[in-house]
Amino acid sequence: MTWFSQNRFDVRLEWGLPAVEYLAGEADCAVIVDVMSFSTCVSLAVDNGARIYPYPWKEASAQAYGRQMGAFTASAERRFTGEGYSLSPASIRRLSAGDRLVLPSPNGSAVSFRAREKVPAVFSGCFRNLAATAEACRAYKRILLIPCGERWPDGILRPAVEDYVAAGGIIAALGREHSSPEAQAAAAAYHAHRQQALRQLRECASAVELRERGFEEDIALCLEENAGIRACRLHGAYYG
């Protein structure tokens, strides 16, 4: 056992791609949490009967991957108006049953893309599908929550409080006794924010960024608790 593995506990938590590289190999189930906005987009799409194909790079290869999957490819630029789709949850609401969409993202998509090689079962979780995700994960013994965080301009991980709190909400809903200190701390953070109906998260750094870019509607969609009805599991290449 390595000192960072948390493998004495049923429920574990660690951040981003390093969590996949160092902890996922000893998990039965992983939950990728990228609230603003990959996981929220996935929840909205799956509720509408669509499929989301995660792709880690916002580059021309995403279009080729979309053609390979028989799917649309979302714009690399966030937007909620006009034709097509993007990482704006408001744009994803237009997806219909049977639609397929490649959704490039350096956080949620990148972690999902890598986790499928390491973990038998991978889910995407957020506030929208908090309860549904916890219910789906109850069948597994060793559960790893992975808040994805965001990126600083130099590419280094920026821990994002909204991901941490949503991961904590899933942990709290699981109700497992044998959770690591890291997982317990996230659950405590969720309970603290839940007492304020998640209002403080409307002023977190990620929400401020979206607001300044004109995506106020996306903030509201990302902070809707249990508005979604389905757990989002990765089936090979796609969430459905």
Image (cartoon, grey):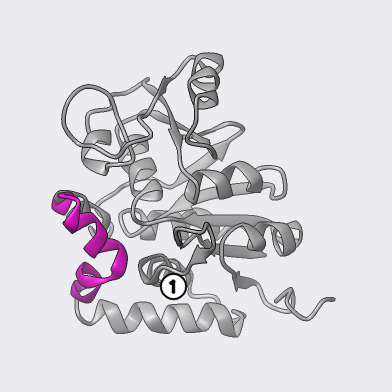
Residues 118 and 36: in front is 36
Residue lying furthest right: 1
The answer to whether residue 79 is left or right of residue 163 is left
Which residue is more in the foreground, 173 or 7? Answer: 7
Residue at coordinates 45% horizontally, 58% vertically from top-left? 153
Query: Which residue is disc 1 drawn over?
Result: 168
- Percent position (x, y) of residue 63? 48, 20
SS at mark 1? helix
Q: Is residue 71 magenta?
A: no
Which percent across, then down, holds residue 88? 27, 42
Q: Main secondary structure of the magenta part?
A: helix
Residue 203 magenta-highlighted: yes
At 56% from the left edge and 15% from the top edge, which residue is drawn?
68
What segment is highlighted magenta in the picture? Answer: 199-216
Query: As drawn, is 136 to the left or to the right of 199?
Result: right
Q: Residues within 10 Å of mark 1 (few under 14, many from 20)?
A: many
Residue shown at 21% from the left, 50% from the top: 218
